[in-house]
Image (cartoon, grey):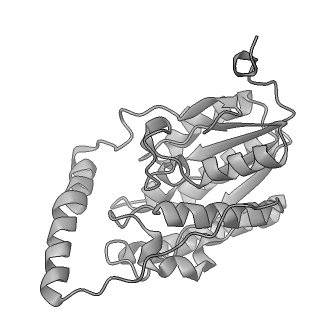
Amino acid sequence: MSAADELDGPFEKRYVALGDSFTEGVGDIDPSSPNGVRGWADRVAAQLIDNDSSWGYANLAIRGKKLQQVIDEQLDAAIALEPTLVTIYAGGNDILRPVVNLDGLMERYRWAVQKLVDTGARVVLFTGFDSGKAPMFRLTRGRTAIYNEAVRKIAADLDLELVDFWHMKHFQDWRYWDVDRMHLSIEGHISMAKEVLAVLGERDEIPQPELDEPAVSSLPERALAEAVWTKDYLYPWVKRRVTRTSSGDNFSPKYPKLTSRIW
C-alpha cells in the first residue's frame, strides 16, 4: 500500500471550523479547492498540519448561513468529530437582515458556544468587522458593535480566546477585500490566517500578502465601477433577501470529515 492509500487519520488533534462564507473562504478563489475557494481556515489548518502531523481538519461552514442554521446543521456534526480546537463565527448574516432580535440571537450564540466548550475543545471566537467605511454595510455598524460586545462578554465569561476583527484596522484597506466588497480577498484571507495563528500561538510561516498599488481612477471610471458592482453584486444580494434564498443553498461543507489532505 502506498502512502497515498493509507488511512487519513485517526488524529490526535482535531480542528473543526464552523460558520458562514467568512470561514468557508468565499473570496479566496481556488479552483482546486472544494467549493472553489480556499480561505483563512484552510490556510490555518495547513500551517497546523505542517507544524504537527497529528492534526486533522474539518470545515463545516457554508456561505449564506444564519446563526440558527449553523447551530442546526453544523453544531452536532462538529461535536461528533470530537474536536480539540474549534473556531466559530456566525451571526453576520442575521445582522444584515432588515429585522433582527440581537438579544435573542446572542442567547442562542452563547448556548452553542457553551455546547462546544463542554466538549473540552479549545474554542476561538471572532468579533465582526467594523463596517463604518463600507457604504453598503455602514448602517449595520451599530448592530455589529452590540454583537461584538456580547461576543466579548461570552469570551470573558468562558475564558475563551478571541480574534478581534473589529480592531484590525488594516482591513479598512479595500485591497484586502474581494470585488464583491462583501468578502475578504485572497490577500485578506491570508492576512486573517496569520491573525488567527497569532492568537493560537502557533508557528506561522505564511508569507505576508503582497498588495498591488492602489488604483487611481477618474470620476467617470468610478461611476462605471459603481454601476457594474450594483448590477453584478448588490442586485443579486438584494434579490436573495427578497426571495428568501441563500447563496449557499446548493453547497455542501468543504471538508465534512477530518482530513490532513487539504491541498
Please indicate whether residue 185 sits to the left or right of residue 16 in the image.
left
Nearest the viewer among 95 and 257 is 257
Nearest the viewer among 248 and 56 is 56
**Residue 79, image x, y percentages:** 72, 33
**Residue 49, image x, y percentages:** 77, 43
- Residue in the picture at 47% in, 50% down: 21
- Residue in the picture at 16% in, 89% down: 219
> Can you tell which quarter of the image residue 204 is in?
bottom right
Image quarter hosting the N terminus? top right
**Residue 166, image x, y percentages:** 58, 75
> Can you tell which quarter of the image residue 247 is in?
top left
Count of numbered badges drawn on the protein: 0
Nearest the viewer among 229 and 125 is 229
- Residue in the picture at 55% in, 75% down: 145
- Residue in the picture at 36% in, 67% down: 181
Q: Residue furthest top?
A: 1
**Residue 164, image x, y percentages:** 66, 71
- Give the vertical position of 56 relative to 178 (above or below): above
- Give the vertical position of 37 relative to 191 (above or below): above
Please indicate whether residue 173 sits to the left or right of residue 196 in the image.
left
